[in-house]
Amino acid sequence: MKEKLFFKTSKGNRLCGILSNPTAEKEKPIIILCHGFSTSKDGNTYVRLEKILNEHGVSTFRFDFFGHGESEGKVEEITTSEAVDDILNAIKFLKESGYKKIGLVGSSFGGMASIITTSKTNDLYVLALKSPVSDYLGKIASQKDKQEIKTWKEKGFIYVPTPDCENHKLNYSFFEDAEKVNGYKCAKKIKVQTLIVHGDKDETVPIEQSIKISSLIENCRLEIIEGGDHTYSKAEHFEKMLDLISKFIITE
């Protein structure tokens, strides 16, 4: 059974998701798939994970964050905290629908949001992260000098490059929010079994972030894919990433 569903956030924003339940049994695990910035629930990673997990009897719910895909809002208005609220409401939606064993897979920006979400709730049993951002302030500081950040504040927005080779508008509220959220602090509160997969040639999110955060999460395994970039553009790297994440979830 696969169906398109809509649910609302705390602010009343309407978000879109695809629920795929191969067994129609709500007692079995369901995994929420959280995409990265400027992408969507229909990205190859999430569609492929849906297929693999469904074949093993694991249900999935891939949804679009606020401002992305078929969900309401403007992408430039997204913040990490907004994404965390989106995930928390996706969890609430699934629980109200009868699901009890819920896990998370988060990629890049969605990985950061998943880290914070997992630190805030006891409703999850497993967490898998694909090339997650753990420290947005550190990431921004490594890419922009103080003058660029000042200009961002004065203009109210900037255009940021993304893995899809397009520049996307992003409001200064993203930076203000990044000053308030800290993935490393949240990591210490995470108790569920966690997997992090990261390529050592990631040009977007420094692998050092995953090395650091993996040491702060109590039950965490870090898998480094040699030669892997942020999007796992080589087929063998992409397939290995999928294999690591899917096997981790299936065996938990």
Image (cartoon, rainbow, N blue to C red):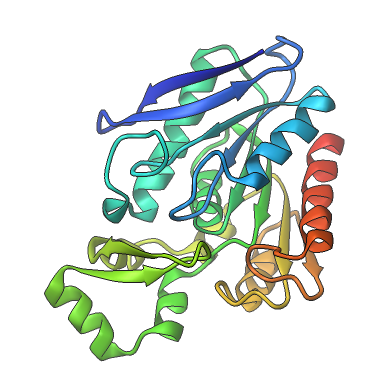
Up-down relation of residue 72 to residue 129 (above or below) = above
* Residue 131 image offset from top left, x and y in percent: 64, 62
Q: Residue furthest left?
A: 154
Q: Residue furthest front?
A: 165
Q: Quadrant of residue 250?
A: top right
Up-down relation of residue 69 to residue 201 (above or below) = above
216 and 17: which is toward the camera: 17
* Residue 45 image offset from top left, x and y in percent: 66, 47
Q: Report the quarter where the C terminus lies.
A: top right
Q: Report the quarter where the N terminus lies.
A: top right
- Give the number of marks: 0
Q: Quadrant of residue 150?
A: bottom left
* Residue 178 image offset from top left, x and y in percent: 35, 65
* Residue 134 image offset from top left, x and y in percent: 54, 65
Asked whether, in this view, residue 225 is left or right of residue 120, the answer is right
Residue at the spot 41% in from the left edge and 46% down from the top edge: 83
Residue at the spot 80% in from the left edge and 68% down from the top edge: 225
Residue at the spot 34% in from the left edge and 54% down from the top edge: 79
Residue 23 in view, yes or no: yes
159 and 59: which is toward the camera: 159
Asked whether, in this view, residue 118 is left or right of residue 75, the answer is right
Residue 221 in view, yes or no: no
Residue at the spot 83% in from the left edge and 26% down from the top edge: 55
